[in-house]
Amino acid sequence: QLHLVESGGGSVQAGGSVRLSCEASGYTYCMAWFRQVPGMEREGVAVIDSDGKTSYVDSVRGRFTISKDNAKNTLYLEMNSLKPEDAAMYYCAAEVFGERAPSYYADYPCVVGLADFSYWGQGTQVTVSS
């Protein structure tokens, strides 16, 4: 059972920056950041695979950077040029290779909008004031 613990959320003015962290209790094959606003569906923001390949939703590309420190099993999301519409609860998600049927990894590649995740953190709130 993998555990994920997020940190780093808070309040920031529009145009500012926030860095989120997510510490995993073990090795992961695919990790991601999602966000959700009350009453809206959860949205995949950024994904990174075990080789460091990244993908982003269009609305954050060029402003957000996902990265991972493999030695620390820690995922990061650097968020710059924040906009009020970026305010949300941000969740870390992860998948562990080998826990699913082999076909799963072809059906759900580690790419934003396609990846599926078994493990989720508790969430960290980001508030952006205009």
Image (tube, grey):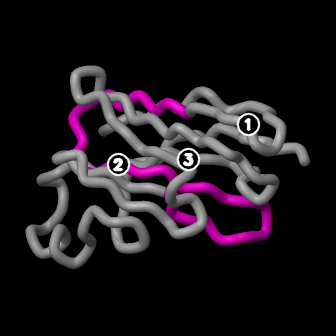
Q: Position of residue 122 (x, y in %)?
A: 58, 40
Q: State left or right for residue 79 relative to residue 75.
A: right
At label 1, the amino acid type is Gly
Highlighted magenta segment, given as a residue range:
20-45
Report crowding for label 3: few under 14, some 14 to 19, many 20 or more residues within 10 A (C-alpha). many
Report crowding for label 2: few under 14, some 14 to 19, many 20 or more residues within 10 A (C-alpha). many
Q: CA distance from mark 3 to mark 1?
A: 20 Å
Q: CA distance from mark 2 to mark 3?
A: 11 Å
Considering depth in this image, is 124 or 54 the residue closer to the camera?
A: 54
Q: Secondary structure at mark 1?
A: loop
Label ID, residue 105: none
Q: Are marks 2 and 1 in contact (CB under 8 Å)?
A: no
Q: Position of residue 70 (x, y in %)?
A: 24, 29
Q: State left or right for residue 39 relative to residue 61.
A: right
Which numbered disc flags the more N-terminal residue, 2 or 1?
A: 1
Residue at the image point whose x is 41% and y is 51% from the top:
32
At label 2, the amino acid type is Met
| Image quarter of residue 125 | top right
Which numbered disc flags the more N-terminal residue, 3 or 1?
A: 1
Q: Say which of marks 3 and 1 sits in front.
A: 1
The residue identified by callout 3 is: 91
The residue identified by callout 2 is: 31
At label 3, the amino acid type is Tyr
Residue at the image point whose x is 64% and y is 33% from the top:
18
Label ID, residue 16: 1
Report crowding for label 1: few under 14, some 14 to 19, many 20 or more residues within 10 A (C-alpha). some
